[in-house]
Amino acid sequence: MSVDVAIVGQPGSGKTTLFRALTGGRSSDGVGMVDVPDPRLERLAAAVQPRRVVPAQVRVADAPPGSRAQRIAAARQADVVVEVLRGFGADRDPVSELEGIELDLAVTDLATVERRLEAVGREVRGGRKERAVELSVLERAREHLDAGGTLATLELDDRSAEFLEPLFPVSGKPRVVVVNVGDDLLPDGGAPARRVRELAAGRGWPTLVVDAQLELELGQLDPADAREMRATYGVPEASLEAVTRAVWEAGGLITFFTAGEPEVRAWPCRRDTPAPAAAGVIHSDFEKGFIRAEVTSVDELVAAGSMEALRAAGRLRVEGRDYRLRDGDVVYFRVGR
Ligand SMILES: Nc1nc2c(ncn2[C@@H]2O[C@H](COP(=O)(O)OP(=O)(O)OP(=O)(O)O)[C@@H](O)[C@H]2O)c(=O)[nH]1
Ligand SMILES: [Mg+2]
């Protein structure tokens, strides 16, 4: 389980540069895994001193080559859409780029909804009255998109929303907005970023300011030189990490941890996942063999130094099949065969 991220944006806004900076140039096919930074994982690792530390990851896909429509369509399978806006060059206008992308997303969905409407309309007229509810949901979606809205702003109850799911709409997905600035706007992005931030915040989306070109170059320097250069520009250490973190949060997954001797690891799961299914994230056999979960918090584990110490002191909570995982739980699963 991971968060799938699609990078979209106008031509030349720096999508590929950001992708390469995020993936550290480790990917050649436009898809790469990126570690999700998590201070809790670092604290656990410092306390337990394991041989390996394994962070959660997001899967990032660069915008593929092709027409505008094809590139947007590629985002339909993603959980989160990262919108890269050009904030460098003399004629930069990230606000209108943001509006342009939003329009592209809405138009893509409008085309899909209209095709579907035609098919379902035919069926209803042909006597399949049970499809009438779906038809009315599709009609509402069309009207809303046609009036300049996106599916993110269309209010639907869960049952109605289910009718849209098979269409893989893009305009309702969570967004993370990245203003890719030239070094004249570092570190905070100045007025252009401020206007983007206002617009995005109104829709509940985070905005991050990054100089993708600079980050790519910094990633190739040795750490001491990189630190010095960051200081010159006043760029925080963790600007790229902040993008990954924002993406992770937008994806809506929670993190639980395992903290054994060889390995301290962050695991993703959906909110309210029952303990056996969470065990199944680690190994598919664990779900069937689930006996119980022994649970603690990062703070408790850091204070005690190890799961064994907590267990010996009788301070691990014992939870059964009905327990639902919470963000930040540190868990040991007891499984049988
Ligand atoms: N000054 C500056 N130039 C950048 C920055 N990011 C990208 N560029 C330059 O802008 C050009 C386009 O960057 P790409 O990353 O290829 O842009 P893209 O969005 O992937 O472009 P397409 O895939 O063709 O749509 C390249 O020449 C980059 O070097 C930046 O942060 N600052
Ligand atoms: Mg590109």
Image: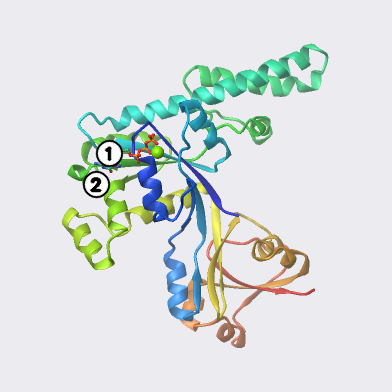
In percent of width and height, residue 101 lies at 42, 29
The part of the image, by quadrant, that contains residue 138 is top right
**Residue type, label 2:** Asp
Which quadrant, please, contains the C terminus? bottom right
Q: Report the disc number at residue 188.
A: 2
Q: Earlier in the sequence, mark 1 or mark 2?
A: 2
Measuring 41% from the left and 47% from the top, which residue is drawn there?
19
Residue 45, relative to residue 174: is it above or below? Answer: below
Determine the quadrant in which ligand 2 lies.
top left
Q: Does 143 sit above or below residue 188?
A: above
| x, y percent for residue 63 | 46, 38
The answer to whether mark 1 and mark 2 are in CB contact below 8 A is yes
Horizontally, residue 5 falls left or right of residue 321, namely: left
| Type of amino acid under label 1 | Ala
Left or right of residue 229, residue 138 in this image? right
Mark 1, other Cα within 10 Å: few <14 / some 14–19 / many ≥20: many
- Residue 232 lies, with reference to residue 123, above or below; the image says below
- Count of marks overlaid on the render: 2
Rendered location of residue 131, percent (x, y): 76, 22
Can residue 141 be seen in this snapshot? no
Task: Name the residue: 43% across, 77% down.
Answer: 46
Distance from disc 1 to disc 2, alpha carbons, whole Å, reads 7 Å
In this view, 279 is above or below 90 = below
Q: Toward which corner of the image does residue 8 lie, by quadrant?
A: top left
Q: Is residue 182 left or right of residue 303?
A: left
Residue topped by disc 1: 193
Image quadrant where one finds the N terminus = bottom right
The circle drawn on residue 56 is none
Any part of residue 174 in sight: yes
